[in-house]
Amino acid sequence: MDDSLPEAHLANAEVLLYYDWKFTDAEREFVGTLQLNPNYSTAYQWYAEFLGLMARHDQAIDQARRAIALDPLSAIIHHQAGNVLHNAGTKGPSRNTTPP
């Protein structure tokens, strides 16, 4: 794997999460991805999903907001943000995911 590619780290994070169930290692890869490219909206989206699965809902919502701020027209990012809010038990319209 080319350590300089954020896409490679993100793919590895997903493998560690869903295939290997190595949650600590997966989070390290998500964070490393965002360090390599802090403007990678998909990485924020997937990291939000991970945080939600770990029941770290406030952090998940924050990451979903960052993803939306970077790519406000992405339907899949809005969809995932809705999932994060739903899983967090948040009531109300999804417009709550827009950045402050």
Image (spheres, rainbow, N blue to C red):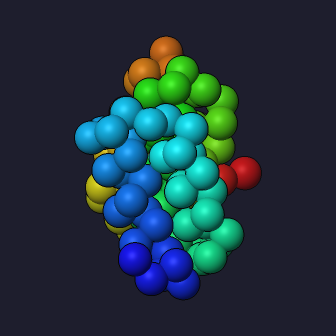
Q: Is residue 73 left or right of residue 98?
A: left
Q: Residue 25: give x, y in percent of width and height.
A: 53, 45
Q: Where 54 falls versus 40 (above or below)?
A: above
Q: Going 43% across and 63% down the picture, which residue do you hit?
A: 10
Residue extending farthest to the right is: 100
- Residue 81 or 40: which is nearer the viewer? 40
- Residue 28 or 100: which is nearer the viewer? 28
Q: Residue 51: give x, y in percent of width and height.
A: 54, 35
Q: Where 95 falls versus 44 (above or below)?
A: above
- Residue 33 or 74: which is nearer the viewer? 33
Q: How many marks?
A: 0
Q: Quadrant of residue 19?
A: top left
The answer to whether any part of residue 89 appears in the image is yes
Q: Going 33% across and 39% down the picture, which residue do you hit?
A: 20
Q: Quadrant of residue 4?
A: bottom right
Q: Residue 46: give x, y in percent of width and height.
A: 43, 51
Q: Going 65% across and 30% down the picture, which residue do you hit?
A: 58
The answer to whether any part of residue 98 appears in the image is no
Q: Going 60% across and 26% down the picture, which residue do you hit?
A: 56
User: Quadrant where the N terminus lies?
Assistant: bottom left
- Residue 96 or 87: which is nearer the viewer? 87
Q: Is residue 11 left or right of residue 99?
A: left
